[in-house]
Amino acid sequence: MIYRANIRPAWVVLVLLLCFAIAFALAKHSDSPADAKQTTKHEVQEKIDMTKFKNSETNEQCLKCHGQSKYTYENAESKKMVNKRMYSELIIKRDEFYVSNHKGFKCTDCHSEEYGTFPHSGNLRMESKANCLDCHGGDEKYAKFQFEKIDSNFMASVHSQKHSTDFTCWMCHNPHTYKINARTNENLKETITYDNLICLSCHSDITKYELLTNKEKPNILVKHEWLPNQASHFTNVRCIECHAQNKDTLIVAHQIVPKNLAVKKCESCHAKNSILYASLFKYQIQENIKTKGWFKGLFLSETSTIGPDQNNTLNIISLALFTLTLLVILIHAVIRIQKSH
């Protein structure tokens, strides 16, 4: 009896581990339909009929010229049709505009009604551009984004302090293409890439960079040569995590700090109280919990590891250790069963 009592714990552990393995496999399997659903969503998005959007018919009056690389008009003097190239910075791509935050707006909601007349008056180029608060300030519908706080943070930013009114919201957020690649996006890599490209649109493009300064454009790789595993950091962490003053109350930090105040300590990210959990991962985890449940959202998401290993190395190691442990217990149980007979 004593000998039989000793083998029961092994059977119990074995059964529990097998149940866990089956549950884990089922959980993985249940993720695949969601992935298929997400793929279908992207496929549908590519087939959107842009004419169904609000004000699309009105906007087409502008996009028939500004929506392609050339435009045609009749010369009032010669009565001949003339083809002209559209300046690249004045081209608005329909497929990008109709997935942006402002897709439902009329062009003249932000631009003068006088643009309805062609040829456009040269004085219209001098008109003041609307800023975010002109529309979103005090708007209860968008209160959760806290535009007023974002604006005050931006005003304290090194961008605003150094360049004053020359640096506007539109320097980073193109009003014709900008969309909230929300911090709740299931694909965190897309969020990181999208946000970093906003920074790189100036810091890696001399034609845009020199509009604000006569300084030589800095070499990003050289400036960050002190950073270990440079490529991994650039693809897995947003620039603003180290170059902005992060605040829990805002979805995205807008107070860019001077370069001498940028984060350079590894423990700032690779620690229990990581700044990444206060900014990049905060909303991602909340969304995971909401959509996948508390356990899977918190412990089985890609954000559950401090200093996330996006190449799945930790996942592979964990799976290998689990498999090895299960194998050892199985072999141990089989040997003990054989000895009992």
Image: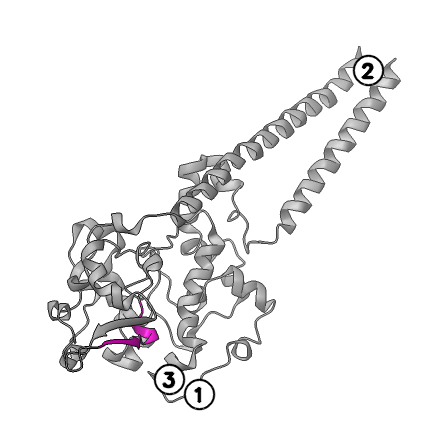
> Looking at the rendered structure, which numbered label has been put on residue 127?
none
* Residue under numbered circle 1: 216
The earlier-in-sequence mark between 1 and 3 is 3
Residue labelled with disc 3: 210
Please give the name of the residue rendered at 11% of the width and 67% of the height, measured from the top-left corner: 113
Question: Which residue occupies the extreme bottom position in the image?
Answer: 214
Among the two numbered marks 2 and 1 on one chain, the one whose residue lies closer to the N terminus: 2
Q: How far apart are marks 1 and 3 (CA)?
A: 8 Å
Q: Nearer the viewer, mark 3 or mark 2?
A: 3
Return the mark for residue 3.
2
| Image vertical order of residue 261 relative to residue 330, above or below | below
* Element assignment for label 1: loop
Q: Which amino acid does label 2 sit on?
A: Tyr
Horizontally, residue 142 falls left or right of residue 307, namely left
Which kind of residue does numbered mark 1 sit on? Glu
Of circles 1 and 3, which is in front? Answer: 3
The front one of 107 and 296 is 107
Tags 1 and 3 touching, CB below 8 Å: no
Q: Is residue 26 magenta?
A: no
Tell me how far mark 2 sits from mark 1, CA to CA. 80 Å
Is residue 273 visible in the rendered image? The answer is no
In the image, the segment drawn in magenta is: 80-91
Pick whichever, 268 or 39, lies toward us. 39
Identify the residue at the far top of this view.
Answer: 1
